[in-house]
Image (cartoon, rainbow, N blue to C red):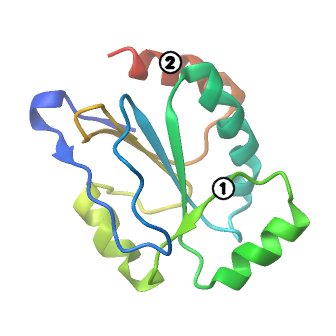
Amino acid sequence: DVYTPPESAKPMSWPAMTDPAPKTASGWRWVNIWATWCKPCVDEMPRIAKWKTKLGVDVTFVSVDESADDITTHKQAHPEMPATTRLADSKTQDTWLHQLGVSDPRLPIHVFVDAQQRVRCIRSGSVNDGDLAIVEKLLAR
């Protein structure tokens, strides 16, 4: 996990995606970068979707899958899957992650963006039930 204080945090930048970039959140935004082939990603998505309401945070799921067909097939097998967008070109993944300040590109990746659109925390690796308190503490800063 990498936490950045507000005064040195990078601005959030969005890559070209298959959908328009999300509108600016009024508070914190949790960006979950995932792929259909990533089992930890798929396992944690319902947890994050459930926490969204509890935490009062906007959540954006961004897939790095190479094709829309991958997501369509996955959605058919997992109809409860939350809405997601996808990188328009999966080859831009490394550049985007570098711009955000991601040092460990293993999926899943969590990017926490404050109300001023600054990247405040990045986590590579999945979140588990026991991580809720840590996320709550981060969002209270």
* Distance between the alpha carbons at the discs numbered 1 and 2: 23 Å
Classify 31 as above or below 91. above
Labels 1, 2: front one: 1
Which quarter of the rendering shows the N terminus? top left
Depth check: give the residue in front, 25 or 92.
25
What amino acid type should be assigned to the residue bearing mark 1? Ala
Classify 72 as above or below 67. above
Residue shown at 66% from the left, 23% from the top: 130
> Which residue is identified by label 1?
83
Q: Is residue 119 left or right of residue 105?
A: left
Q: Is residue 104 left or right of residue 117?
A: right
> Which residue is identified by label 2?
136
Assess disc 2: are there few (<14), some (14-19) or many (≥20) residues with their C-alpha within 10 Å of its C-alpha.
Answer: some
Element at badge 2?
helix
What amino acid type should be assigned to the residue bearing mark 2? Glu
Classify 95 as above or below 120. below
Residue shown at 11% from the left, 36% from the top: 8
Q: Which mark is residue 32?
A: none
Element at badge 1?
loop
Residue furthest out toward the left? 7
Q: Is residue 74 left or right of residue 133?
A: right
Q: Position of residue 61 (x, y in %)?
A: 56, 54
Find out whether the residues at labels 1 and 2 contact each other: C-beta distance under 8 Å.
no
